[in-house]
Amino acid sequence: MQIASSPVWCNVVNLSLFDEGDQQKEREPGDGGERSLDCRPVSSGCREAAHRTEVAAVEQVVVVGVAAQRAMPVIDHTRLEANGRLNPARKIALGQFMTPTVIADFMASLFSPRSGTVRLLDAGAGVGSLTDAFIKRWGGRDVCVTAYEIDPTMLGYLRQTLGAHGNSAEAKIVERDFIQDAVYRIKLGNREHFTHAILNPPYKKINSGSEHRALLRAVGLETVNLYAAFLGLAIELMEEGGELIAIIPRSFCNGLYYKPFREWIFQKTSVEHIHLFHSRTSAFIDDEVLQENIIIKLVRGKKQGRVTISTASDARLSDLQTHEYGFSEIVNDADSQKFIHVPTSPSHTGAGGVPLAARSLDEIGLEVSTGPIVDFRLKEFLREQPESGSVPLLYPTHFAGGYLEWPRQSKKLNAIINNAETQKWLYPNGWYTVARRFSSKEERRRIMAHVVDPGAFTTNAVGFENHLNVFHSGKKGIAKNVAHGLAAFLNSTAVDDYFRRFSGHTQVNATDLRLLRYPELVELEALGQWARKQDRLTEELIDQKIEAMSGKRK
Ligand SMILES: C[S@@+](CC[C@H](N)C(=O)[O-])C[C@H]1O[C@@H](n2cnc3c(N)ncnc32)[C@H](O)[C@@H]1O
């Protein structure tokens, strides 16, 4: 790759984290950090910032004397070139999915205009695409960048990217683990107080016994993924009024494990803007990223106001649409889990808006559980065909045609032996509503519900496999009309849309279904009675019926 400008490296400091005395020692060339005296003076705002951050172990303050001559989007070539050089295993381990220019530019455009010194944090900077977009957005104004990166392949490209910005920015590249460094800074009271942060952090699970988990706990941040750790720590490192823009998976919006992280966000920042990518792959078009991503803008210490939601269906953001919502439409006051809903159009009226939905499951005397039979654990008791002493075992495949078909002539199992070992996992034969736990990303709906008719079986018990959620009442069946009504309600467009607003997953768990609101029991009965009379029950018919019933209620 051709780089027109040659960066001048200066002020390399290698300072021990805890030994004050060591902080004055400069390193010689070749001992891990190169030092040059041929540097331009660091501007005063940035120098102050640099002095405040002397604790980092290896920091390179880069001041570049030659103006950038290269035209964009060279950064995209850099990104793709670096992508090709990454070690595939390390790429997964470090969550190295880099941001394309069009998205980086969009993210940078979301910062509010402001005057004064700009101190930017880019944690997990990769080849520097986000900082590059930020500096372009800020024009010729003084920008002091602190970029964290630990991968040597990335670091070479990062230096080139930042070096190419000539007079418009100073950059300090910190070759350290961001989590470790940020936690030490917070604990030692040595924060930089950034005015801006732009992040595409690594995505990877944090194991419960890991050093990262212990470090995060030390600053009160409980989280299960690196992306939330990066964003949570970045929030801590911001000055009051500082703005953060991050592209992250959507999983934190509703995962139970992310509740402390959501609370961290709500306590410390206001949520200003959420951008939702309609397609799972659209943000990271060059990588096989199947996570659904959002871009979120947060402002440290600002009182929460209305929230802007934007959506686009493709990576070029060609059909960008923007709407504003009250915060209560994004996070329902009554929701103790504080799920974040992302309405995709104004007709989706935020966290409420599903016709007839008024009651919790508990209030109408129903429950939902995950199918308790995990087949590989009970292998010895499973049967391909029913036999004496067995009872039906229901999988999603038994509802493949939209209705119950059992036994099914397929490779799947159909039965489970009913004995002392298996009994505790079985339900009494009866009417149930089941909802599939998994759908493929191509499927139009996430929530797909079916009715279990006890007349299909001659046994007094039935088994539900773990890929189904089961609606029941105290581990027993429910009324016939309620089972039909519940399935119809769950199969309505409004319920599926509502689910998608708080979940980016293809998976529908019992916890998600517990958090939905449902019609009154009498309404479910009436809906069920109506549903049973229909020759062909389509989603459109269900929607019309539910609208009509909700009109009557008003
Ligand atoms: C998802 S990539 C994003 C890169 C870049 N910000 C972009 O948007 O293209 C995350 C980057 O974080 C780096 N990284 C992973 N773990 C890190 C850590 N603990 N500290 C600092 N950087 C880390 C990876 O090497 C990778 O370059």
Image: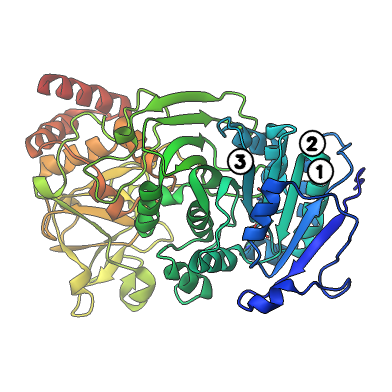
Q: Position of residue 384 (x, y in %)?
A: 36, 66
2 and 1 marks in contact (CB < 8 Å): yes
The answer to which of marks 1 and 3 sits earlier in the sequence is 1
**Residue linked to disc 1:** 77
- Residue nearest the observer in this picture, 450 or 13: 13
Identify residue for label 2.
Answer: 73
Could you tell me which secondary element the residue under label 1 belongs to? helix
**Disc 3 residue: CB within 8 Å of ligand 1:** no
Name the element at disc 3. loop
Task: Give the amino acid at mark 1.
Answer: His
Left or right of 312? Residue 287 is: right
In this rendered view, identify the residue nearer to me: 28 or 68: 28
* 191 sits to left or right of 513: right
Residue type, mark 2 in image: Pro
Q: Indicate the position of residue 184 as horizontal and vertical percent values.
A: 54, 69
Q: Earlier in the sequence, mark 3 or mark 2?
A: 2
Dot 2 falls on a residue whose secondary structure is loop
- Can you say which quadrant of the picture contains the C terminus? top left
Query: Which percent across, then down, holds residue 243?
Result: 52, 41
Residue position marked by numbered label 3 in the rendering: 283
Quarter of the render that holds ligand 1: bottom right
Measure how far apart labels 2 and 1 are at the Cα level.
Answer: 7 Å
Q: Is residue 254 visible?
A: no
Inspect this view and state whether residue 321 appears.
yes
